[in-house]
């Protein structure tokens, strides 16, 4: 399997290089050159397999010769064998044709574990084979950072530095990053906003001398290996409700960077019987506005109670745009550089029609999110986190508007455990959801973090100092 860049100017790579490279050299994102097919016979065979077995079967179609079968299978068994629910991504039926897929049974209680855990082990395997070490830097508004720290803790081949905005992540999210007692994990509270954290990471990567000296690597969702393992739960869930070409399923996905829903799109390209894909947004609704008008128009981010979706520029949307532009890298480059300059671009009516032939977009605002948490609790007894509620709010609108018929099986994704966002849940239903027993004392655990000024010299000196100390000790 070969990978090409969405900007059309970077070299074609195999999976192993795509894994370590992240962003392509032309500023684009890597996508598979062709989509491998899952035939109806393949799907029939997969329907009898466990989650880890399905993960192995799906991912091996993309990984080429990067891993032998025993290694890849071992990774999947180890990762998904440690999740807390034996089904890994269980479905809960909410009404006659609506299911909620729970994606919070991994170590940090959000769906990002499903791919990040695999990514961490793939990195370790490849780095050991090559005899290389990397310095991982990443910015987080909450969920990505803890998932990355859990995935790389105790890795002998990686030092990991995660920047979060000081005082602006939830106490549960902060403790998940700061209480991990592993010598290669470094949680940094930056005196600034999430955007400052992201800019700091970009500045580190743009400092070519620093990047090369410390072998910097990134783990955000522009890395194809963050998307690939997410394809698996679309396959397992569609198969477990018996989806077929005659009776396909539709998915509703709470969307920020467009990574998770792009995995649904990938599954559909491979032949999974998927009908509609619903982009669920909170009040930061640039994507649902795009699907209504064909115009991408930047507005300021309004902080919400579903903070992992407080995003205006969805990095993975570029992967879909590449297909919408018939894989014309120059056209993608032009549209996105215009967007960067003016905060605006538009697609033709024909392209909008094609996008709307498979995607819908619905927005759920703050009051709507709380009202959905309350309604779902009263109707079904399920306690949902605010991101999952944005998704269920969109599912309801999809039915009410007629976009999705009442007879269409629909799966709405629950991407975080309600105890990760207890304040929002309490404000909606007056109940404070409890953390699972293994994390019950999380907020009392001792924190380790470094507070740093939002200053490039301070940050780069800090990282260089730690990496040098480690190298001298080795
Ligand atoms: C990351 C995240 C999202 C957004 O997912 P994307 O892949 O960025 O679209 C939604 N909900 C939760 C809980 C998340 O952690």
Image (tube, rainbow, N blue to C red):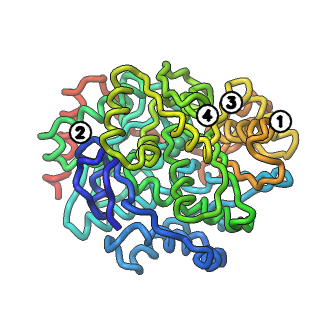
Q: Is tag 2's residue or tag 4's residue first in the polypeptide sequence? A: 2
Query: Which label lies toward us, 1 or 4?
Result: 4
Taking 89 as reference, is 280 above or below it?
A: above
> Residue at position x 31%, y 57% from top?
18
**Quarter occupied by the N terminus:** bottom left
Ligand 1 contact, mark 1 (Cβ < 8 Å) = no
How many labels, in total? 4
Report which residue position mark 1 lands on: 375
Report which residue position mark 2 lands on: 205
Q: Ligand 1 appears in which quadrant?
A: top right
Give the CA distance from mark 1 to mark 3.
14 Å
Q: Is residue 387 left or right of residue 322?
A: right
Ligand 1 contact, mark 4 (Cβ < 8 Å) = no
Q: Is tag 3's residue or tag 4's residue first in the polypeptide sequence? A: 4
Which structural element holds mark 3? loop
Q: Is tag 1's residue or tag 2's residue first in the polypeptide sequence? A: 2
Mark 1 neighbour density, 10 Å: few (under 14) some (14–19) many (20 or more): some
Q: Which mark is residue 281?
A: 4
Would you say the residues marked 3 and 4 are in contact, meaning their CB atoms lie under 8 Å apart?
yes
Question: Where residue 211 appears, x then y in whole percent?
Answer: 18, 43
Give the CA distance from mark 2 to mark 3.
35 Å
Mark 4 neighbour density, 10 Å: few (under 14) some (14–19) many (20 or more): many
């Amino acid at each position: 399997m070969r990978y090409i860049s969405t900007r059309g100017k970077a070299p074609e790579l195999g999976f192993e290089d795509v894994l370590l490279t992240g962003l392509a050299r032309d500023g684009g994102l890597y996508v598979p050159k062709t989509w491998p097919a899952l035939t109806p016979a393949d799907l029939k065979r997969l329907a009898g397999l466990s989650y880890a077995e399905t993960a192995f079967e799906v991912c091996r179609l993309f990984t080429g010769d990067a891993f032998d079968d025993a290694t890849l299978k071992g990774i999947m068994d180890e990762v998904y064998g440690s999740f807390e629910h034996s089904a890994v991504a269980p479905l809960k039926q909410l009404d006659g044709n609506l299911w909620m897929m729970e994606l919070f049974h991994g170590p940090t209680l959000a769906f990002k574990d499903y791919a990040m855990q695999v990514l961490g082990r793939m990195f370790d395997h490849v780095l050991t084979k090559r005899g290389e070490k990397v310095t991982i830097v990443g910015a987080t508004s909450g969920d990505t950072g803890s998932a990355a720290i859990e995935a790389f803790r105790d890795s002998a081949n990686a030092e990991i530095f995660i920047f979060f905005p000081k005082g602006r992540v939830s106490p549960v999210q902060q403790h998940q990053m700061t209480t991990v007692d592993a010598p290669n994990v470094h949680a940094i509270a930056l005196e600034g906003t999430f955007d400052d954290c992201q800019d700091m990471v970009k500045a580190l990567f743009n400092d070519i001398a620093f990047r090369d000296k410390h072998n910097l690597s990134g783990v955000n969702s522009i890395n194809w290996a963050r998307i690939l393992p997410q394809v698996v739960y679309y396959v397992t869930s569609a198969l477990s409700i018996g989806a077929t070409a005659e009776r396909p399923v539709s998915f509703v996905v709470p969307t920020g960077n467009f990574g998770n829903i792009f995995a649904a799109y990938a599954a559909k390209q491979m032949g999974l019987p998927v009908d509609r894909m619903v982009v669920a947004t909170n009040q930061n609704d640039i994507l649902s506005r795009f699907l209504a008008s064909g115009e991408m128009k930047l507005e300021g981010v309004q902080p919400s109670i579903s903070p992992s979706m407080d995003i205006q520029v969805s990095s993975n949307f570029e992967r879909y745009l590449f297909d919408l532009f018939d894989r014309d890298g120059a056209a993608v480059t032009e549209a996105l550089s215009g967007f960067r300059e003016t905060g605006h671009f538009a697609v033709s009516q024909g392209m909008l029609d094609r996008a709307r032939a498979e995607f819908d977009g619905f927005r759920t605002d703050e009051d709507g999110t709380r009202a959905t948490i309350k309604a779902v609790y009263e109707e079904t007894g399920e306690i949902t986190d605010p991101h999952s509620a944005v998704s269920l709010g969109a599912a309801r609108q999809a039915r009410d508007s007629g976009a999705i018929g009442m007879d269409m099986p629909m799966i709405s994704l629950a991407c975080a455990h309600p105890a990760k966002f207890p304040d929002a849940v309490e404000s909606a239903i007056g109940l404070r959801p409890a953390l699972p027993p293994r994390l019950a004392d999380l907020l009392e655990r001792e924190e380790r973090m470094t507070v740093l000024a939002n200053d490039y010299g301070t940050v780069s000196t800090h990282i260089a100092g730690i990496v040098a100390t480690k190298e001298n000790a080795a």
